Image (cartoon, helix red, strand yellow):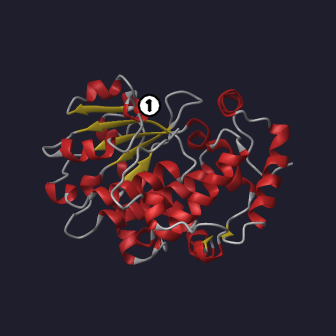
């Protein structure tokens, strides 16, 4: 039997219905992926069951898509060195950002088989002290933890609430089209996590410019999953019940501080895992055929293509 967590009943039903999961076949699919990874001269990848099943679920059990996504997962990271340079959660800058609680997965979901809800608060970091790359590094690390731990995220997807309170023009100026493209590829093409909606609240002046920049990289399905509520939280509650939010937002999900402390402990528990990451990636000199470079992965020659994400 594969060494993966049994799913709760509601998620098991969703995995069978929406992701084509057949429990009796998982072992065989995992073995196929491991055999394929072993034969790739350029690829050094993790091969434990819980890690690989994340890709099978993220690709609805298409083995070919799972292979492509595992390869892209590592080739993006090998080519996006700015964001992978320091993965130690105990380094001073990383720990400072973790303690700000910029991105916080909320403990409860709308339904027993619902997506994980993530509260993102970019306004809590000082734009003259930290760069968006530093913040994104922690976000990617949190996603890595969730890939291994969070069955709601891996089976049902994730839904974001982006609270733009206290975001200034200095924050917006940290975004360039190149960086937005890299972040979008990394988050939506190279991670086996499906986006199920994004809700923007407390939007400031200047928001439209960055918002439109993000939208242009998404396909129509994902553009239709974006919702701008401005200051109207009642409008947000129509999608996400108020009680699921932290108490600072009128909900019952504990305080932002409590959630931040919980996630700081989680980062520390995974410290060895993150330090091991340096062993994994792609060696493009050994890749059969054309090497993957920043230009081929991110299209940084200026010819932006629409991203096809599920």
One can see residue 262 in this view? no
Q: Is 309 located above or below residue 36 in the figure? A: above
Q: Is 53 located above or below residue 295 in the figure? A: above
One can see residue 92 in this view? yes
Residue at the spot 27% in from the left edge and 25% down from the top edge: 234
Residue at the spot 59% in from the left edge and 71% down from the top edge: 277
Q: Say which of 22 and 255 sits in front.
A: 22
Residue occupying the far top of the picture: 238
User: Residue 75 at x, y = what percent?
Assistant: 56, 65
Q: Quadrant of residue 124?
A: bottom left
User: Residue 179 at x, y = what percent?
Assistant: 33, 60
How dense is the environment of label 1, judged by Cα within 10 Å: few (below 14), some, or many (20 and up)? few
Residue at the spot 54% in from the left edge and 31% down from the top edge: 114
Q: In which quarter of the image is residue 248?
A: top left
- How many marks do you count on the picture? 1
Residue at the spot 49% in from the left edge and 74% down from the top edge: 88
User: Residue 198 at x, y = what percent?
Assistant: 38, 37
Q: In this view, does 77 lie to the left or right of 202?
A: right
Q: Is residue 26 left or right of residue 173?
A: right
Q: Mark 1 points at which residue?
A: 221
Mark 1 falls on what kind of element? Answer: helix
């Amino acid at each position: 039997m594969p060494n993966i967590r049994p799913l709760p009943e509601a998620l098991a039903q969703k995995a069978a219905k929406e992701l084509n999961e057949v429990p009796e076949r998982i072992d065989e699919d995992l073995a196929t992926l491991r055999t394929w990874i072993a034969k790739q001269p350029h690829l050094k990848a993790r091969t434990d069951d819980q890690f690989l099943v994340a890709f099978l679920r993220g690709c609805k059990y298409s083995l070919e898509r799972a292979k492509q996504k595992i390869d892209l997962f590592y080739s993006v990271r090998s080519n996006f060195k700015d964001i992978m340079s320091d993965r130690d959660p105990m380094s001073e800058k990383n720990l400072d950002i973790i303690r700000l609680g910029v991105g916080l997965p909320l403990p409860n979901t709308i339904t027993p088989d619902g997506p994980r809800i993530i509260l993102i608060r970019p306004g809590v970091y000082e734009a003259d002290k930290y760069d968006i790359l530093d913040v994104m590094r922690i976000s990617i690390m949190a996603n890595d933890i969730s890939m291994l731990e969070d069955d709601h995220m891996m089976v049902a997807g994730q839904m974001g609430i982006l609270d733009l309170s206290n975001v200034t023009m200095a924050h917006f100026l940290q975004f360039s089209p190149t960086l937005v493209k890299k972040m979008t590829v990394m988050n939506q093409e190279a991670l086996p996590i499906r986006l199920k909606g994004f809700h923007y609240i407390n939007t400031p002046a200047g928001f439209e410019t960055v918002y439109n920049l993000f939208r242009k990289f998404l396909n129509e399905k994902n553009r239709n999953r974006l919702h701008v509520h401005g200051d109207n939280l009642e409008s947000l509650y129509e999608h996400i019940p108020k009680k699921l939010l932290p108490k600072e937002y009128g909900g019952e999900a504990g305080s932002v501080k409590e959630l931040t402390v919980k996630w700081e402990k989680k980062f520390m528990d995974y410290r060895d895992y993150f330090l091991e990451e340096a062993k994994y990636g792609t060696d493009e000199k050994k890749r059969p055929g054309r090497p993957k470079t920043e230009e081929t992965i991110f299209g940084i020659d200026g010819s932006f293509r629409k991203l096809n994400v599920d």
